[in-house]
Amino acid sequence: MDNIKTVYDNSVQDLLNSINLSNKMQAPKIVKVSLNMGLGKMSDAGKDGKLIEEAVNELSRIANQKAVATKAKKSEAGFKLREGSSIGARVTLRGNKMYEFLMKLLHLALPRVRDFRGISRKAFDKRGNYNLGIQDHLIFPEIDPTKTSRSKGLNITIVTTAQNDDGALILMEKLGFPFKKK
């Protein structure tokens, strides 16, 4: 299992050739990874402080970095939501912690998904960033299923410097992301 940073450093020239770029500084790279755990529909998450605290602690264990609780920006009567109430947790990873998380995601968590056939090629946002939704956070080895109250979803956003989706797709394929076969 090679480190993703090492794999990137070894494949930069091949990446430049496949995208038709001349300068090494133009090569796309991963800038940051954002993790978001929204608890909006989970039985009045704003009123239940234990659920928010549990989500922050679990997301901190998954990311190996302290997560923060997210708060509602405005009130919404239809959702029984008050401005300033906690509705989820988030954390942003950069540098070595980002690469450690990606290694854990690719080599430990995604293979634990039932009937996993690869991640979608269609989840790019036209600017070279990738969004991955995980329905159950229990696929991460840090989470003990007996100590969590319920399974929670997780959104992972991988931000790259690629100018378009094609460059980001080639970058992520070189780094070993398991995309579905065409």
Image (cartoon, helix red, strand yellow):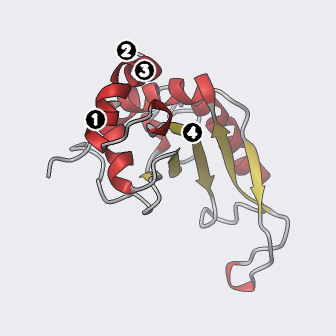
Nearer to the camera, 125 or 153: 125
The residue sitting at the bottom extreme is 78
Q: Residues within 10 Å of mark 3 (few under 14, many from 20)?
A: few
Secondary-structure class at tag 2: loop
Secondary-structure class at tag 3: helix
Marker disc for residue 9: 3
Residue at mark 3 to residue at mark 1: CA–CA distance: 14 Å
**Callout 4–callout 1 Cβ contact below 8 Å:** no
**Residue that carries the numbered disc 2 in the rendered image:** 2
**Callout 2–callout 3 Cβ contact below 8 Å:** no
Residue at mark 2 to residue at mark 1: CA–CA distance: 22 Å
Nearer to the camera, 32 or 148: 32
Residue at the image position 82 percent from the left and 63 percent from the top: 85
Mark in the foreground, 4 or 1: 1
Q: Give the amino acid type for the residue marked by disc 1 in the picture.
A: Asn
Mark positioned earlier in the residue sequence (3 or 1) = 3
Residue 117 in the image: state x and y as whole percent: 21, 44
Mark positioned earlier in the residue sequence (4 or 3) = 3
Nearer to the camera, 15 or 33: 15
**Residue that carries the numbered disc 4 in the rendered image:** 31
Mark positioned earlier in the residue sequence (2 or 4) = 2
**Callout 2–callout 1 Cβ contact below 8 Å:** no
Residue at mark 4 to residue at mark 3: CA–CA distance: 14 Å
Mark in the foreground, 2 or 3: 3
Q: Give the amino acid type for the residue marked by disc 4 in the picture.
A: Val
Residue 81 in the image: state x and y as whole percent: 76, 74
Residue at the image position 45 percent from the left and 48 percent from the top: 162
Residue at mark 2 to residue at mark 3: CA–CA distance: 11 Å
Nearer to the camera, 123 or 10: 10
**Residue that carries the numbered disc 1 in the rendered image:** 17
